């Protein structure tokens, strides 16, 4: 088989920790090509990545270094040329790390995006990934027979039962949380997890609404009246790598209507997770925080260009969402479907590229058969082992 890795927005960590191990396994028995630009804005393939794969002499590299190579990240100046090259290469499979969907949608073969596998509150290591038809299709479930659904439930029950105890917590904001966060008691609380906005994150091009985050804050201040209080949390990588001065100032300009909370609450838990449990609603775009709202049954407004599973009951219109929240009548995600999705995600979807038992054929099998009950038992066992390591 001929396999192409198309990697215009690959970061060094992603290549070393995730892509290179898959290249190694696939190159053992298949023809592997890598098409990517040279480094720019924290992305691309450079000398370090080539050195990482120096032992794989059979891998064929196609490194774009022309003056227009930065445009590969968002809207290639030579989109037609890239498409023509890939069509001439005629790969059987294309694995992408690309924010530009229009280009990859024109590629031949089976095309999949390599995306983060994290889905809190599941304990999934950051190196684990999933393969998707589009980058931010959230919560999708295949049609499962009754027997398949029952088997999935039984396999994942030992993992779900301790998690579900947390799910049963009160939907009202706890007094201690309100006091710590200095949140009002006289109006609904809307949780808003801000997304990563470092220069290397070209996926931000898909966001609906103002950018950067400081502009989003001002936009929401205009769209949402003072019947609601907005509780923002920052992305952890923003706190590590981004100048947050503008967004802090934008939120501080509306002290009676919004607040930016620390990333960790007094109990040592993620503040985003705490708010997902206790807030009256969440406003998200393409953030993985959708999984927290799904887990806790919290109504959500999702502004996106991508698919959202029906069982999430996500609102797409902000006025309808606010009206329902104000009336206390907003629909949240379906609890039974949420349990089924988390089980399916852990058993079927997530892949550990560094699994010592993983083969190239295992990777191709996931591309050929996205839903396969034959891998569920091993998938749950791998998840259980990783979760135990995280606790230890």
Image (cartoon, rainbow, N blue to C red):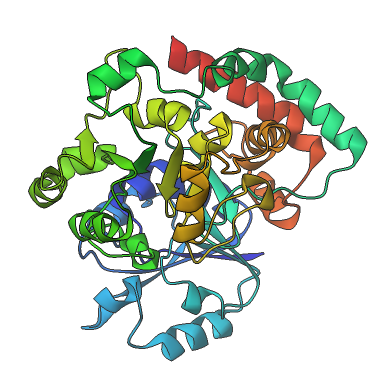
In the foreground, 199 or 302:
302
Residue drawn at the location 18% of the way across and 55% of the way down: 214
Give coordinates of residue 171: x percent, y percent.
51, 24
* Residue 374 visible somewhere in the drawing: yes
Q: Residue furthest top?
A: 392
Residue 303: tell me if it is visible: no
Image quarter where the N terminus lies is bottom right
**303 lies above or below 61:** above
Q: Where in the figure is residue 381, as x and y percent of width and height?
A: 67, 22
Q: Nearer the viewer, residue 44 or 252?
A: 252
**Placement of the C terminus among the 4 image quadrants:** top left
Query: Residue 144: x, y in percent?
Result: 84, 44
Q: Is 36 situated above or below 370?
A: below
Total numbered labels: 0
Residue 202 found in image quarter: bottom left
Side of 290 where 186 appears, left or right: left
Q: Please tell me which residue is depicted at 21% across the width and 58% down the height of the picture.
A: 218
Q: Position of residue 120 (x, y in %)?
A: 49, 31
**Of the pair 247 and 62, the residue shown nearer to us:** 247
């Amino acid at each position: 088989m001929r396999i192409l890795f198309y990697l215009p927005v690959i970061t060094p960590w992603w290549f070393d920790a995730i892509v290179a191990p898959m290249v190694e396994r696939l190159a053992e028995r298949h023809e592997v090509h890598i098409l990517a630009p040279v480094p720019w804005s924290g992305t691309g393939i450079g000398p370090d990545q080539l050195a990482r794969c120096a032992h794989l002499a059979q891998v064929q590299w196609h490194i774009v270094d022309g003056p227009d190579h930065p445009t590969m990240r968002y809207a290639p100046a030579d989109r037609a040329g890239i498409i023509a090259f890939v069509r001439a290469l005629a790969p059987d499979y294309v694995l992408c790390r690309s924010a530009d969907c229009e280009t990859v949608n024109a590629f031949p073969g089976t095309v999949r995006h390599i995306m983060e596998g994290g889905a809190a509150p599941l304990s999934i290591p950051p190196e684990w990934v999933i393969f998707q038809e589009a980058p931010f299709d959230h919560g999708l479930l295949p049609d499962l027979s009754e027997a398949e659904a029952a088997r999935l439930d039984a396999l994942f029950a030992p993992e779900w039962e301790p998690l579900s105890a947390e799910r049963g917590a009160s939907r009202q904001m706890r007094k201690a949380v309100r006091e710590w966060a200095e949140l009002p008691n006289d109006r609904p609380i809307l949780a808003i997890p801000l997304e990563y906005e470092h220069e290397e994150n070209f996926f931000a091009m898909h966001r609906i609404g103002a950018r950067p985050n400081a502009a989003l804050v001002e936009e929401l201040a205009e769209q949402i009246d003072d019947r609601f209080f907005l509780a923002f949390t920052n992305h952890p990588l923003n706190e590590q790598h981004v100048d947050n001065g503008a967004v802090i100032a934008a939120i501080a300009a509306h002290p009676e209507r919004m607040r930016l909370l620390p990333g960790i609450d007094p109990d040592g838990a993620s503040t985003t997770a705490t708010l997902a449990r206790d807030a009256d609603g969440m406003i998200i775009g393409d953030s993985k925080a959708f999984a927290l709202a799904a887990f806790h049954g919290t109504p959500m407004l999702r502004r996106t260009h991508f698919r959202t599973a029906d069982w999430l009951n996500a609102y797409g219109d902000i006025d309808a969402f606010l009206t329902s929240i104000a009336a206390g009548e907003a629909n949240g995600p379906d609890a039974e479907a949420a349990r089924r999705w988390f089980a399916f995600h852990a058993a079927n979807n997530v892949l550990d590229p560094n699994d010592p038992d993983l083969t190239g054929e295992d990777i191709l099998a996931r591309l050929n058969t996205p839903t396969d009950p034959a891998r569920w038992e091993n998938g749950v066992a791998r998840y259980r082992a990783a979760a135990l390591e995280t606790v230890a």
